[in-house]
Amino acid sequence: MSQQEERPRVDQADLRWCHESVQGVSRTFALTVDVLDEPMSSYICLGYLVCRIADTVEDASHIPPEDQVSLLDTYDAVLDPEDDTDPEAFAAAVEPHLPDDGELTEDWAVVRDSPRVLRTFGSLPEDVQEAIVPPARELVQGMAEFVERYEDEGGLRIQTKSELEEYCYYAAGTVGNLITNLVTRGDVAAERRRRLYDTAEEFGLLLQLVNISKDVYDDYTAENNVYLPAEWLRDEGVPQDEVVDEDHRASAASVVRRTAEFAGSFLDDAQTYLETVPLRDGNTLEAWAIPFLLAVGTLRELLAQPEDALSATGVKISRQEVLAVVSEMSGAGGESRESLGQLRESIASTPYHRTPSSAD
Ligand SMILES: CC(C)=CCC/C(C)=C/CC/C(C)=C/COP(=O)(O)OP(=O)(O)O
């Protein structure tokens, strides 16, 4: 976005609308934004929406890949402080691709109203915008790169483990850096800062890989994307385009398990991040501990029933467990950093609401 002479004041109606929009488009960040305090809650809300607009364009299987790439390039130019492409130019370019009124999901409503998101973003403090823009642009450019790479395939077909890591970096590692840029503004001891940047991308990879492992069926049937690496599927004799076929159920399930185990390899780094992150400026431990612990629970279910990720059954933890984790973390000042490891161990073995209490 072009540099403004003077930053406008945040319009409260716009800000309220941004908060309502996050509740409509994301489960993870709806919880997170809810348990952050101000001003971090609004910073993360806006940072998330800026990224989500690109994500919606990337996931749009109804838009021809060359148009997706051009839209993402335009969006990147809007975010570029050195470029004077304005948000209306992006809105005009995307307008012909918007689903009809009756089918306009909340995701697409946010894309249509992107100038409102970007105007609100542009009224945040300068240092907040500077924390968000570089990783957000990296995410946008990475998405354009992947759409272009697979434009002849009609959807993404991740080939190797290292390509999977590269994709996850753009989709979520960048978000880890964005969050870290925000929560380390100001004075942070060099060693603490180093430990956070050493583990932030890994935290993002953990969350993204858990989603990839559990959403195989939906990703393929709804968006024509296969993130399970072709080389891993080949090891099990599964052609990538037959990943959800019943004939390959057991073999493909072992690739789901392998991907979930890969996700699990990032748990220690994510825990280190949680034990290190500064809690100030409205940042809270529970905001990031909740997605971490929900990922631990989802991994437990995935490792127990990997084949469910390959059918409409799907893998998810119960609503009851989500509520139990959220209330444990956000009740009475939240759990302390010291008990995170214990909580992680407990959730890895047993659904949280069923953990025996001392009265049992
Ligand atoms: C340092 C740190 C805290 C790193 C973590 C970074 C992070 C939160 C990355 C986003 C990961 C992700 C897959 C979110 C899904 O939310 P979604 O809104 O796309 O989807 P949902 O509706 O399924 O939750």
Image (cartoon, grey):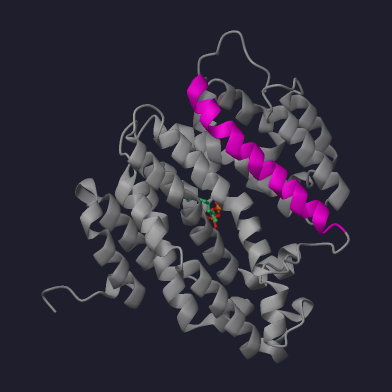
Q: Residue 157: percent from the left, percent from the top?
A: 76, 67
The residue sitting at the top extreme is 5
Task: For the N terminus, give its image quadrant.
Answer: top right
Q: Is residue 350 visible?
A: no
- Indicate whether residue 128 is drawn in magenta: yes
Q: Is residue 14 left or right of residue 276?
A: right
Residues shaded magenta: 124-151
Q: Is residue 335 above or below residue 69?
A: below
Residue found at x 28% / y 50%: 330
Residue found at x 65% / y 64%: 162
Residue found at x 77% / y 23%: 85
Q: Residue 281: percent from the left, percent from the top?
A: 34, 31
Based on the displayed image, in which of its 4 quarters is residue 279 positioned? Answer: top left
Q: Is residue 152 left or right of residue 336?
A: right
The residue sitting at the front extreme is 191
Q: Residue 56: percent from the left, percent from the top?
A: 69, 48
Q: Residue 4: percent from the left, percent from the top?
A: 62, 13
- Indicate whether residue 5 is drawn in magenta: no
Q: Is residue 145 above or below residue 70?
A: below
